[in-house]
Image: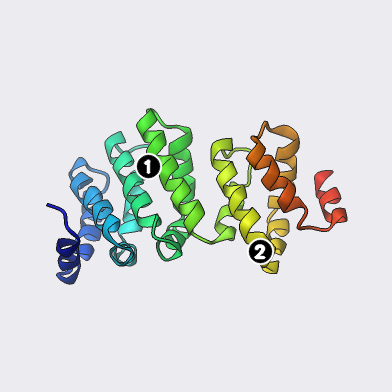
Amino acid sequence: RKTGELCHQAIADGGVNCLAKNLQIEEGHSNALPTILTIGHMAEFSATLAQQAVMSGCSSGLLRYLSPDVKEALRVAAAWSISRLARHGPDTAGPLAQAPALPPLLKMYSGGKSEKTQERAKEALKEIIHNCHDLSALEPMVDKKTPPEILRHVLAEFETGLPSSVPSKRNFVTSGALMRMLNMKKTMELDGRSQDSIRIISELFPEDVVTYYNAG
């Protein structure tokens, strides 16, 4: 039986810390599956529960279960629980982005052995990308190695976030993200939405800057 009341009681009794500790103790073993799923179910009930899980170290514990050396069922469950944590906004998705959760999830998605594995990894990626509100964490994903169906979500966040932030625009250039983005436009087959995002982002910068990096 899963209810919000029981979840809040578990937190009040120190249950979240026990879950985080259990993830460490099991360290990739199948016995951790109930713990992984419990974290996800708790996070589904409220943002407060999700924040408690992140603050207790559950999120960083879950990342260890994304490793290719871990059984597929555990990886799928961990990705699902991460998506449940990340869906509540920057207070939960931000720490996950900084952990960093995006690289192992991207690797899991690209090398997924099954449709379910890819589906869970993609869901977690999208939740973090759209909710972390941390463009610096997304800059490495502006890269030709990022699958187009994931890249479009990354570009959409920059399209939304760059116009109102001068520091973010500066970082977008100095990190090499602008040059990589312009290069992708020339070398990759992108869907219309991604092309529109690239055009809108490019128009945020002086023409001579775009011309310079477009020639790089």
In the rendering, which numbered label is found on residue 77? Answer: none
Instruction: Please name the amino acid that badge 2 sits on.
Output: Ser
**Left or right for 146, reference 84:** right
Judging by the rendered image, the residue that carries numbered circle 1 is 67
**At 76% from the left edge and 58% from the top edge, which residue is drawn?**
204
User: In the image, which is nearer the foreground, mark 2 or mark 1?
Assistant: 2
Could you tell me how far apart the alpha carbons at marks 2 and 1 are, in whole angstroms? 31 Å
In the rendering, which numbered label is found on residue 168? Answer: 2
Looking at the picture, how far across and down is residue 36, in whole percent?
Answer: 25, 49
Instruction: Please name the amino acid that badge 1 sits on.
Output: Ser
Q: Quadrant of residue 7?
A: bottom left
Q: Secondary structure at mark 1?
A: loop
Q: Residue furthest left?
A: 1
Against 149, is 138 above or below?
below
**At 64% from the left edge and 35% from the top edge, which residue is drawn?**
191
**Left or right for 85, reference 152:** left
Looking at the picture, how far across and down is residue 97, in whole percent?
Answer: 47, 57
Residue 105 is at least partly visible in this image: yes
Residue 180 is at least partly visible in this image: no
Q: Residue furthest top?
A: 114
**At 66% from the left edge and 66% from the top edge, which residue is drawn?**
164
Looking at the picture, how far across and down is residue 20, in whole percent?
Answer: 25, 59
Mark 1 neighbour class, 10 Å CA radius: few under 14, some 14 to 19, many 20 or more: some
**Pick the front one: 115 or 195:** 195
Q: Earlier in the sequence, mark 2 or mark 1?
A: 1
